[in-house]
Structures are given as structure tokens and as C-alpha cells.
Image (tube, helix red, strand yellow):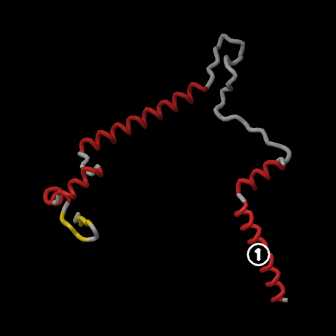
Amino acid sequence: DHILYLSGGTIKAQGTFQELMVECPDFANLMSIAGGMEDEKEKEEREEKARQESEKKQEEKKKEKTEKIVVEDEDADDKPKSKVSGKLVESEDKAVGSVQFKYYLAYLASAGVPMMVLALTLFVLEAAGQTMANYWLS
């Protein structure tokens, strides 16, 4: 790779990364500040640590899921020992009825007055445009 080091809108140095690190102290300083001097070994160690942590989290999630399943004791009276059913997915109930008016008001209030004015203006313009198009075509 060929790198151009710019400072104040002019090219101060150019070359490969290694050349600039040796020949241009400003570039070397910039790389040390920006963290560009990370050693390959440190990078590999950091990636390995992140991979191990990810695997641990996955194992913990898997363990939590298996703990949710209720194991029934054969000697029990065919009743689970906890309120959790053996299913991981429960059926949902369908809501019946309508949404209360206060929720509509809260939704409109969250949009704010400018947005409501814009929506109303666009609606009126669209209706006027449709009317004019029908008049023109008739």
C-alpha cells in the first residue's frame, strides 16, 4: 500500500507504512495516538478473547433454556413441580375490542404540532390535486 500523509492541505510525506513510520515523526505520532500501532499478537489475543466470551454467552443462553424445561419426577402425582409448563413457546390470546381514544391522542401528541400541520397540508394538497385532475380530464 502507498500512503500519502497530508497536513494543512499539502502532502508532507508518502510511502509505505513502514517507511512513513521511520521517516516521518508526525505520522508515527499520529499512529501512536490513533492506536494504529497495535501489535499483531495483541490483536490476535483480543480476537481470541472476544471469541471465547461469545462462546460462553451462547453456552449460558443454552443452559438457561434447558433449565426452563420442567423435569417431572416419576414418583410424583403426574404434576410438574413448578408453574412453568414443559413448552418453550406458549400460545397467545387474541385481544378483542378496540383501542381507547386516549391512545390515539397520545400518538398524535407525540408527533407534535408541526408534523400534524404538515400532514394536514399534504392531505389538502393531494385532495385538491385529485379534484383538479378530475376536472381537467372531464
Q: Classify 110 as above or below 82.
A: below
| Residue at the far top in the pictured view | 75
| Residue at the far left in the pictured view | 23
Answer with left or right where residue 67 lies relative to residue 2.
right
Answer with left or right where residue 23 lies relative to residue 11.
left
Q: Amino acid at mark 1?
A: Glu
Residues 43 and 7: in front is 7
Residue 123: percent from the left, percent from the top? 77, 71
Q: Classify 136 as above or below 103.
A: below
Indicate the quadrant containing the N terminus: top left, top right, bottom left or bottom right: bottom left
Indicate the quadrant containing the C terminus: top left, top right, bottom left or bottom right: bottom right
Answer few, some or many: residues within 10 Å of disc 1's Cα (few below 14, many 20 plus, some between 14 and 19): few
Residue at (38, 39) in percent of width and height = 51
Residue at (29, 39) in percent of width and height = 45
Helix, strand or loop at label 1? It is helix
Residue 23: percent from the left, percent from the top? 13, 60
Residue 29: percent from the left, percent from the top? 22, 53
Q: Classify 23 as above or below 57.
A: below
Residues 49 and 117: in front is 117
Q: Which residue is mark 1?
A: 126
Answer with left or right where residue 102 lies relative to residue 54.
right
Residue at (63, 22) in percent of width and height = 70
Q: Classify 124 as above or below 51.
A: below
